[in-house]
Image (tube, helix red, strand yellow):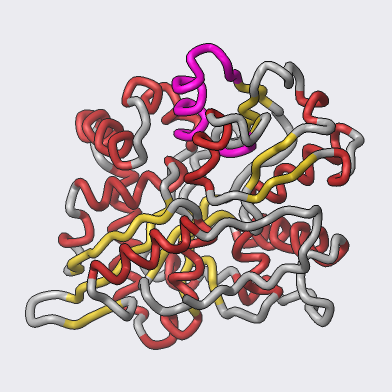
Amino acid sequence: MLNVFTFKRVFGSKSHSRGVARGIATLAAAGFAFGMVQNASAQTVNIGEGLSLGWAQLFVADTEKLWEKQGLQSNSITFPSGRLVLDAVAGNRVLIGTAAETPVVFAALNGVPVRIIATTNNGGGAPYEPFEIVANQSIRAAADIKGKRIGYSQGTNAHYYLSKLLDKLGLKWSDIQAVSLSPGDFVSSLVNGSLDGFVWTEPAISQAVAQGHGRFHTIATPGVYAAISAVITLQSTIDKQPDALRRALRAIHAADTLDASAEQRDIGEVAQRVNFDPALAAQYWPKLNLKVGLDKASVVRQLESQARWALANGLVRPDAKMPDFNQVVVTSVLDSIQ
């Protein structure tokens, strides 16, 4: 599997690979080696979906068969994180995928031609701030993470969030015991006592609290970081398969325009896909700001800011240079369907 993330080892953390293995196994079981296969009736496309509510439109497109309405036969493949989705995109195993902006930054710094062609949280509400601290009773406030074993996922936006949180608290990475894990291991590691806390999003937050039976709680950190939920592909896919990309974006965009009764049904279906309590998902839904769009200037600024952070902290290879993120954010595909 192509790994587009070349990190300098820092903070004494160890990346786990079980999530990667699960993604590979899923792809192998699906029997597809490429992002798109032509058959007699429709184009069969592999869609990489991160297990997060932030990309709910793609799950809705699955449920409502919106891909098929655009002449695509979709094979949706789920991954524990957007970073693993990006690996599949970079390896040309999926046509499009979902990722937050941080994996895209690391990929660009490593010269991988991944492109953002849309974002899914343009609803105009409050900034989408999906991260919270989930902790045991030894951590009662955010500042209490000092000296504690804190789980995060290297190369994801949780990595960037935790860095921003430490800055806000006046702490350094050396002030905590940072443990990089696959997101699928956060809850079990907290439950078995390997961690004192972790930083991640729903549904892991609610799952940990439920499994803790009163031992765990959450700590909100408003104003630390607002996430970007991106739809990504390769530049070569934009060049060679623009029609398939247009149809895929039309399907995702159509998920924004379903009527209220369909939305209620889809909330339940999406919750089931990500293993989230439907009642909690309904409460959380408005926070997602779900609407397909692409504010290029804003996204470029965020990418540049995170690239400066990665370079300043030695998180990439020594010869890495600041990419031209105006080339990374491509509006032409979305513009062509509107």
Q: What is the quadrant of residue 89 in the picture?
A: bottom left
Name the residue at 44% across, 44% down.
Answer: 52
Name the residue at 37% across, 31% down.
Answer: 276
Q: In this view, does 116 lie to the left or right of 262?
A: right
Out of 11 and 79, give the one closest to the viewer.
11
Name the residue at 75% across, 58% down.
Answer: 306
User: Could you tell me which quadrant the C terminus lies in?
Assistant: bottom left
Could you say where residue 292 lies in the image, as x and y percent from the top left? 43, 51
Q: Is residue 67 left or right of residue 10?
A: left
Name the residue at 66% across, 31% down.
Answer: 197
Tell me if residue 60 comes above or below residue 264 in the rendering. Answer: below
Could you say where residue 332 lies in the image, as x and y percent from the top left? 48, 73
Out of 229 and 316, give the one closest to the viewer.
316
Query: Does 193 appear in magenta?
Result: no
The boundaries of the magenta stretch are 198-217
Q: Is residue 262 left or right of residue 9?
A: left
Could you say where residue 77 lies in the image, as x and y percent from the top left? 32, 60
